[in-house]
Amino acid sequence: MPQRPAYLAAYAGLWALLLASATIAVTFGPAEISPTEVWGTILHHLGMAGDSPLSHLRDAIVWQLRLPRVLAALGIGAGLALAGTVMQVLTRNPLADPYLLGLSSGAALGAVIFLLTGAALLMPVGAFLGSLAALGLALLIARLLGGATPSRAILAGICIAALASAATSLLIFWSATGDSYREILSWLLGSLSGTTWGDAVLVMLALALCTPIILLSGRGLDAFAFGDDAAASLGIDITRLRWTLLAATALLTGVMVAIGGAIGFVGLVVPHAVRLAVGSRHRVLLPMSMLVGAIFMLWTDTAARTLFDPRELPVGIVTALIGAPAFLLILLRYRRVT
Amino acid sequence: MRLVVLTTALLALSGPAFAATTYPLTLQNCGAEVTFDKAPARVVTIKSTATELLLSLGLGDRIVGVGFQDGPLPEALAAAGASLKVLADKLPSQEVVLETDPDFIYGGWESNFAADGAGERPTLEQLGVKTYVAPAACRTVKPPKLSFDAIFAEIGEMGSIFDADAAATALVDSQKASLAALAPDPRGLTAVWYSSGTKAPYVGAGSNAPAMIMTALGLKNVFGDVDDGWVAASWEAVVDANPDVIVLVDAAWNPAAQKIKLLSENPITSQLDAVVNQRYLIIPFPASEAGVRNVPATLDLAKQLAALNIPAK
């Protein structure tokens, strides 16, 4: 296992890569605006430079369209990777991610219900309630089966995910009018189109609230990995810790799904890739997964909005296209390692 | 198709004496060969465009059921279509369609003929039910860039199928005359055809009814280079183009007023010239897909466009 200075270098490297990625990604887009103009505009809005070099509309392209989307992509990538890492430990199942446990499907159902009842503005609340309800239901079912063991939680989660997806499809089939299904479909596939400052701020708030809670539980998570009894013997209140972490994960997933739709594979692939590189000590694994998730999400979303200009591709397609083969590669590496 | 050309040629020679259709009549339609032994007597139409075309030919009494109507009938057809039996608000299922004992199904979209819709075309053919897909909406065989002539050809084909050449020719002639009287707007204006969508705008692209209508109006379509009927574009591309006018599609489920509200409340689209100056052209949804309403809708849009006062750039 690498020494501590090596971690510091890795952190520094990832932060540098993240900042460089954001700096570059914001200059990409269907509108041809030079990097100097893009950054002149951003610095102007930050009060660090004089007049914006662009006309008010092109200024708005940078400040109102691109920047919030870049920030939301970073936040959602970090949040999904974080939620995935926590899920994998809590369920002691390497396949766990917000998807498999039904959280994403629950969030999608909650969001669609709120959307269709005309409460579009409260969609994040619906998504949060949905993901919380899915989680609660999965744990309840697992308990009814005789105790919330990891495999039971997963099986219950799969069941809830299927049920929530079917209910979502039913709602859409029953209520979608004209071509409104197109918008819902794109959101279900995962898409950051039309992200506003409000969305970006919400994502950042959710991260700011949940990240400290989860990062501070790093030691507890390490203990969890060896089983509930081992954790309890270390003097950890496992019930309380588990519920705290589950609630934080549900909140994160709910907000991320409400803003970006059901973006797959980030929560699954990123933690595994990072674990392969730095091992499974959570004090290192959690922040690194967040950084890698953020960078991965930013570039996949940049690809989604620029590759087929002037069309937009739902970013969930890109993350799955890259994520699924990447996951296979990771599995092969694991086989060689173990 | 050849028959139509032939019929048209004959008509040209013979003047007002219209040739009756000789059955069996075989035509190629969207990758399938369809043979009619007689004029259809029990018709199911799916989508407004199909219903409205037959009503315009005075064939309302042949329609035994309609499905997937996109909006109210235009005033001129309202009386003729008042008592049509609606099979389903959306796509009717195969059983519902077959229950009406149809001998012909006319679909405005190729996807209407799916197993979970009116039924697949070969299956229906085996049951003795003839089918026809509006050529502009064909996917199996990519249609050429839509033109008014292609719509007139569809009207002509329906005239042949139903032995109603006189009505078809009269309709085509009157639409041609209206179109000939239309002068494209000389101001060289750019436009975006905003059909639906909030997060990503769904806009008219380069090859279907939106492109055809905008060209006739003399508008330069911002997304005209995209070889597709409509496309899910990005707001960035719309804002970057800052179009002179925005064409809004008005549907019951997504009214133009809602789009105007969205455009003017969004912090970025609210700064577009067309939004600041309220330069909108509004077209009803059923008239925005290829069909008999395109010509009257184009004339109406031309009036709306002429009324807009746009300062030279």
Image (spheres, coloured by chain):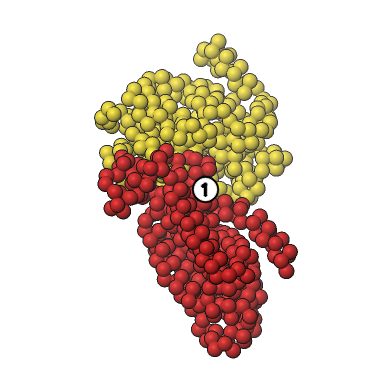
Q: Mark 1 lies on which chain?
A: A
Q: Position of residue A195 (x, y in %)?
A: 42, 53
Establish if B89 lies above or below B181.
below
Which quadrant: the C terminus of chain B?
A: top left
> Which of the pair A198/B118 is nearer the observer?
A198
Q: Is residue A166 visible?
A: no
Say which residue label 1 marks.
A304
Q: The yellow chain is which one?
A: B
Which quadrant: the N terminus of chain B?
A: top right
Q: Which residue is drawn at 42% across and 25% down?
A: B216
Q: Which residue is drawn at 55% across and 15% down?
A: B11
Q: Dividing the picture into quarters, in which one does residue B300 lie?
A: top left
Q: Can residue A207 be seen in this view?
A: yes
> Which of the pair A51/A149 is nearer the observer?
A51
- Relative to residue A100, is residue A33 drawn left or right? left
Q: Is mark 1 on a helix, strand or loop?
A: helix
Say which amino acid is labelled 1. Answer: Ala
Q: Position of residue A73 (x, y in %)?
A: 47, 56
Q: Which chain is red?
A: A
> Which of the pair B115/A276 is nearer the observer?
A276
Q: Residue at x 37, y 31 (%)?
A: B190
Q: Residue at x 55, y 70 (%)?
A: A4
- Relative to residue A39, is residue B51 drawn left or right? right
Establish if A235 lies above or below B291.
below
Establish if B264 lies above or below A173.
above
